[in-house]
């Protein structure tokens, strides 16, 4: 039943996806379901078959059957043009028949599938040639002539000179079946004497090592024998005087030479062979990495050069054309310049083999250091050989770098390159930052040769620029910047003889910088030009400054006043993101693209009532979020974190404007009603101080923080364009700009207490306005009550006057509260109700004079804390913003009374 239910669900999904007409859907569903139920067999899963074949091919390669894997791939490729609907079934059938293909498959069995050539001609043999040309009848041709020294005339040797073609072939076949020896190669009977001489000359090899009484015996050898054995040993051949570990065999001693002298001499040769042993062993290994393969090839060339020199020495001693003195020490001195660079290479191989899990480019690092050391030591031959090998190996390492910088691609499976790609595709704005990363070791070091680390950043950014240009469909535009040919990176070009005294590291760095510049400038120039010309980076920055940094005061005031009006009227419209978007687009439509601008509200602010949202700059204003959509290439320079920083500055400026708005539109003063009191003077004093403080903060932000840093950012971006900088330089310039704004505008974590204190002062402005409004309401109620009582106490005009006075009082009160009772909040609390509640909350049973004195005291305390804190932080810090903190502290200390 579970199977039928699953089948029915899948059938419904299939019919719904294919059929768009509801009327016929049920009929199709029943027909399809009935067909599937009555289907007695299922088709082979072609994707599973393909995966199994690919897995089989990969398994062949893993276990070392590369030839079998290649043959399988060739047959699959040949089958591809002839595929039909039954091909997966046939392949599946063959896979099911397969029985351990890795062990049982034999590549030679494929030869049986090769059809024989039709009418193949029989092979031509010497027998056929002899029969056709008549050689068989001319018996004199097969006679041997003795050309020995003792014969003056050509004589025929009976019994050995005549041999037919059949006898020669039979003899040669017999000889091929057994191993040939020196006796077989000797020409008898004259060669027997020479063979005997050779055997006598080599008799020292089989000389007994002990005397008859069991004491060890030293076999004397000649200088020529020792030299020949030493040269064979240096060539990597087996010898009698040296064992497998290149140690001298102690049973032999040079004739007429003391044992100590012989031991010192033969040890010098054995030491040479021991140093070359790692080199020859590595040259015989098989490597998978291309970098190691080219290094091994260079070592083989160096060893072949040594073998050629050894052969020349042997030729000089064997084919003597002039008097030659056989000198073992002289041969060592002659081989010294050739062996010196080989010793360095052998030491590099040994050092890498002793390390644990070395990287393939470890050889490059050691070669680089060895080249520089050889130059410092003045070893010219070693310097040239090692330098040539280094650049030959470095050419292989340049291939992935060239592919990355020109095409933005990575070689699959390359473990030597220092760039890796994220397995998941990221959104376009995050390609620059997250799609590609620099590989690092577990210790945190870059997975790259040490000598390339100064250029790693430029290589990395050049490749990322190509990737971004490809997403822009502008990769072809880089061709107009490409140089005709890249600089050569070989030893002859980088290290010419004219600059032999210049340090190798500086020569290489200069050449590699030129090579990088030829690649890097192409992508960087194109991407930079597109960002400024096609994607409007400058215009986007100006738009952000208009919106978030409030560079246009009139438009920013238009937006802020609309928000403040909704807050003061207890209207919930400011919490609607559509209303906010409309207000923002209307305010900034003249300076930005309005369709890119939207607004949102933080859902956490909805938990506060309209009264609480209006009473503090901390609750309502931080919830307002303005969003300006940037094109994705511009978001590379201005990431999401930068927009959040802009939002922080926007909120802080909006809070300052809120305090200014409250203070610049005060409640109707008591003095206008003809009742001037000392509280009125205290109110105006505190209001003027709050206005001064808020204007000081606003002026500081505008003139000392925002304007200079904005101009500096535009200058840095313009200079970056002129200096051919890359995108990372522009990103760094904008990040530095944002960091300066955060620090200098008191938004950093270090100045958080000071910023909170500044917000407390902004809240004091709202509390002062609320206290004054509550006092005005109380005085108004008191005046109405006095007027009512005075009318009631008059016996003659009580009725008429009472009615007239009450009506006038109500009309006046209604006019004064027309703005406050205009709207109701979500909780149904009107402006009049708020007036009564707010007055009670602010006063808490205290008189207006007491409230004003408390507010004034809080302001003085906050002002001293802000000024003193800024002064202390500025003196204790060495940051660039410390000078501006000190300047703001000096501006605020003007208002502190001693």
Image (cartoon, grey):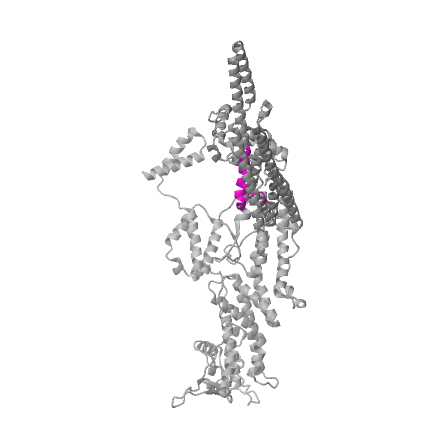
Q: Is residue 867 above or below residue 343?
A: above
> Which image quadrant for residue 58?
bottom left
Magenta stretch? 744-765
Q: In which quarter of the image is the N terminus?
A: top left
The answer, for residue 742, to whether it is visible in the render is no
Residue found 40% across the figure and 50% down from its top: 92
Quadrant of the image containing the C terminus = top right
Instruction: Return the x and y of residue 510 as percentages of the image width and height.
Output: 64, 60
What's the residue at 64%, 63% (across, down)? 494
Looking at the image, residue 841 lies above or below residue 57: above
Q: Position of residue 330 (x, y in %)?
A: 58, 82
Q: Position of residue 53 (x, y in %)?
A: 43, 52
In the image, farthest residue toward the top: 796
Looking at the image, which is closer to me, 311 or 129? Answer: 311
Residue 664 versus residue 309 in the image, above or below: above
User: Would residue 725 be counted in the magenta stretch?
Assistant: no
Residue 151 appears in which quarter of the rendering?
Answer: bottom right
Report whether 92 appears left or right of 198.
left
User: Observer-nearest residue: 275 or 856?
Assistant: 856
Q: Nearer the viewer, residue 579 or 158?
A: 579
How many badges with numbers are in the image?
0
Left or right: residue 362 compared with residue 554: left
Task: Give the image location of residue 411, x and y in percent.
Answer: 53, 55
Instruction: Verify whether residue 753 appears in magenta.
Output: yes
Decide if residue 40 is in sight here. yes
Magenta stretch: helix, strand or loop mostly = helix
Between 74 and 243, the one lying in front of the other is: 243
């Amino acid at each position: 039943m579970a199977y039928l239910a699953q089948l029915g669900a899948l059938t419904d999904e299939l019919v719904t996806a294919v059929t768009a007409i509801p009327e016929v859907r049920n009929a199709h569903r029943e027909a399809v379901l009935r067909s599937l139920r009555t289907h007695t067999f299922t088709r082979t899963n072609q994707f599973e078959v393909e995966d199994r074949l690919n897995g089989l091919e990969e398994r062949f390669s893993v276990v070392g059957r590369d030839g079998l894997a290649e043959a399988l791939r060739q047959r699959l490729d040949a089958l591809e043009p002839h595929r039909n609907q039954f091909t997966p079934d046939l392949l599946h059938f063959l896979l099911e028949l397969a029985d351990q293909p890795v062990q049982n498959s034999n590549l030679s069995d494929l030869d049986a599938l090769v059809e024989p050539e039709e009418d193949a001609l029989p092979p031509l043999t010497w027998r056929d040639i002899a029969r056709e040309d008549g050689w068989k009848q001319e018996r004199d041709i097969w006679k041997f002539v003795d050309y020995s020294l003792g014969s003056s005339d050509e004589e025929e040797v009976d019994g050995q000179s005549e041999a037919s073609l059949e006898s020669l072939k039979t003899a040669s076949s017999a000889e091929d079946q057994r191993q040939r020896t020196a006796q077989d190669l000797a020409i008898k009977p004259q060669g027997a004497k020479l063979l005997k001489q050779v055997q006598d000359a080599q008799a020292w090899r089989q000389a007994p090592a002990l005397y008859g009484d069991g004491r060890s015996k030293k076999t004397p050898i000649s200088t020529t024998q020792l030299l020949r054995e030493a040269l064979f040993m240096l060539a990597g051949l087996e010898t009698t005087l040296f064992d497998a570990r290149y140690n001298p065999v102690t049973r032999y001693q040079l004739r007429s030479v003391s044992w100590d002298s012989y031991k010192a001499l033969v040890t010098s040769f054995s030491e040479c062979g021991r140093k070359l042993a790692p080199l020859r062993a590595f040259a015989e290994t098989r490597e998978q990495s291309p970098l190691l393969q080219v290094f091994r090839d260079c070592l083989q060339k160096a060893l072949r050069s040594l073998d050629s020199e050894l052969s020349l020495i042997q030729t000089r001693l064997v084919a003597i054309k002039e008097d030659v003195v056989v000198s073992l020490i002289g041969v060592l001195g002659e081989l010294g310049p050739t062996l010196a660079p080989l010793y360095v290479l052998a030491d590099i191989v040994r050092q890498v083999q002793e390390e644990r899990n070395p990287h393939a480019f470890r050889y490059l690092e050691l070669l680089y250091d060895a080249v520089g050391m050889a130059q410092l030591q003045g070893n010219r031959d070693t310097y040239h050989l090692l330098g040539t090998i280094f650049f030959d190996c470095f050419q292989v390492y340049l291939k992935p770098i060239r592919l990355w910088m020109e095409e933005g691609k990575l070689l699959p499976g390359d473990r030597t390159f220092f760039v890796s790609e994220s397995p998941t595709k990221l959104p376009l704005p995050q390609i620059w930052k997250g799609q590609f990363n620099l590989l690092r070791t577990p210790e945190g070091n870059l997975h790259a040769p040490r000598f390339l680390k100064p250029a790693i950043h430029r290589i990395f950014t050049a490749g990322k620029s190509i990737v971004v240009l490809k997403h822009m469909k502008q990769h072809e535009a880089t061709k107009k910047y490409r140089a005709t040919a890249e600089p050569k990176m070989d030893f002859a070009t980088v290290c010419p003889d004219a600059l032999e005294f210049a340090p190798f590291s500086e020569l290489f760095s200069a050449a590699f910088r030129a090579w990088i510049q030829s690649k890097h400038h192409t992508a960087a120039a194109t991407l930079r030009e597109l960002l400024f010309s096609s994607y409007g980076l400058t215009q986007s920055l100006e738009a952000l400054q208009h919106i978030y940094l409030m560079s246009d005061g009139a438009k920013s005031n238009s937006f802020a006043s609309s928000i403040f009006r909704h807050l003061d009227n207890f209207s919930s419209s400011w919490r609607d993101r559509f209303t906010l978007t409309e207000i923002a687009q209307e305010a900034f439509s003249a300076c930005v693209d309005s369709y890119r601008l939207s607004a949102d509200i933080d859902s956490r602010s909805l938990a506060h009532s309209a009264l609480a949202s209006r009473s503090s700059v901390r609750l309502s204003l931080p919830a307002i979020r303005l969003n300006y959509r940037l094109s994705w290439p511009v978001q590379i320079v201005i990431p999401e974190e930068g927009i959040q920083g802009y939002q922080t500055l926007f909120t802080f400026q909006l809070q300052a404007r809120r305090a200014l708005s409250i203070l610049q539109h005060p409640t109707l003063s008591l003095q206008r009603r003809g009742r001037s009191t000392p509280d009125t003077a205290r109110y105006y004093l505190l209001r003027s101080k709050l206005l001064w403080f808020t204007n000081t903060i606003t002026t500081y932000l505008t003139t000392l923080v925002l304007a200079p840093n904005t101009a500096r950012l535009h200058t840095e971006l313009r200079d970056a364009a002129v200096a051919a900088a890359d995108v990372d330089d522009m990103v760094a310039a904008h990040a530095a700009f944002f960091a300066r704004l955060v620090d200098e505008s008191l938004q950093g974590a270090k100045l958080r207490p000071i910023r909170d204190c500044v917000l407390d002062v902004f809240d004091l402005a709202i509390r002062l306005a609320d206290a004054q409004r509550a006092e005005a309401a109380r005085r108004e109620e008191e005046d109405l009550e006095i007027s009512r009582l005075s009318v009631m106490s008059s016996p003659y005009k009580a009725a008429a006057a009472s009615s007239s006075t009450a009506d006038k009082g109500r009309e006046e009160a209604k006019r004064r509260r027309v703005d406050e009772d205009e709207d109701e909040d979500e909780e149904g609390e009107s402006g009049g109700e708020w007036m009564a509640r707010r007055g009670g909350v602010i006063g808490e049973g205290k008189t207006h004079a007491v409230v004003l004195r408390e507010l004034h005291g809080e302001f003085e305390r906050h002002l001293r804390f802000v000024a003193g804190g800024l002064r202390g932080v500025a003196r204790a810090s060495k940051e660039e913003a410390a000078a501006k903190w000190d300047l703001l502290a000096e501006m605020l200390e003007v208002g502190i009374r001693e």
